[in-house]
Image (spheres, grey):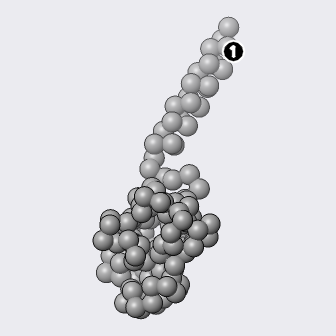
């Protein structure tokens, strides 16, 4: 009977542990969808430093992923679709940084902090997001 009680306790702890891990704020697979609703889903992703975030265009429209240059941690590498070296250059060449339907864009972040980004064609409609890097 003690063995049965022990097994039930272990099972209960496993379920509680899984629930705690699921509520930690980390996104399973670190995937962000670019949607038809002109949104990033989820809008906020929490990752560990050195992890990669994959943006997937699930929409019929092309989108971009463009960091706000002044809203990345100090010393962090700037990122954008099209691999532009600055936000200004990304804005000046919108078509060169568009992600088409079914395509993806990946970014690996190594500096802890908050990275804010947006979609150039849909910024005014609120297509913005952030990546929180812990570490």
Q: Is residue 99 left or right of residue 67?
A: right
Instruction: Locate the N terminus by quadrant.
Output: top right
Position above or below: 120 against 90: above
Residue 90's quadrant in the figure?
bottom left
Q: Position of residue 72 (x, y in %)?
A: 37, 76
Which residue, as the protein is rendered here, is positioned at the far front?
60
| Residue at figure coordinates x 40%, y 91% from the top left | 92
Count neighbours of disc 1 (C-alpha within 10 A) and say few if under 14, some if 14 to 19, many if 20 or more. few
Residue 14's quadrant in the figure?
top right
| Residue at figure coordinates x 59%, y 56% from the top left | 29
Q: How many marks?
A: 1
Q: Position of residue 52 (x, y in %)?
A: 57, 67
| Residue at figure coordinates x 50%, y 69% from the top left | 61
Viewer can see residue 97 = yes
Q: Position of residue 103 (x, y in %)?
A: 61, 70
From the viewer's side, name the closer residue of 91 and 51: 91
From the viewer's side, name the closer residue of 116 and 92: 92
Position above or below: 11 against 130: above
Position above or below: 93 against 53: below
Viewer can see residue 54 = no
Q: Which residue is mark 1?
A: 3
Q: Is residue 31 left or right of residue 74?
A: right
From the viewer's side, name the closer residue of 61 and 91: 61
Q: Position of residue 56 (x, y in %)?
A: 57, 64
Mark 1 lies on a secondary structure that is helix
| Residue at figure coordinates x 48%, y 72% from the top left | 63
């Amino acid at each position: 009977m003690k063995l049965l009680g022990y097994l039930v306790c272990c099972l209960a702890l496993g379920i509680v542990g899984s629930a705690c891990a699921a509520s930690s704020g980390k996104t399973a697979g670190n995937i962000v969808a670019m949607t038809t609703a002109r949104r990033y889903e989820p809008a906020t992703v929490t990752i560990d430093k050195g992890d990669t975030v994959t943006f997937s265009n699930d929409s019929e429209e092309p989108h971009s992923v463009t960091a706000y240059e002044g809203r990345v941690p100090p010393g962090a590498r700037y990122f954008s679709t099209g691999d532009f070296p600055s936000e200004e250059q990304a804005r000046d060449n919108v078509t060169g940084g568009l992600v088409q339907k079914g395509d993806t864009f990946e970014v690996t972040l190594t500096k802890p902090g908050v990275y804010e980004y947006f979609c150039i064609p849909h910024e005014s409609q609120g297509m913005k997001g952030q990546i929180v890097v812990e570490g």
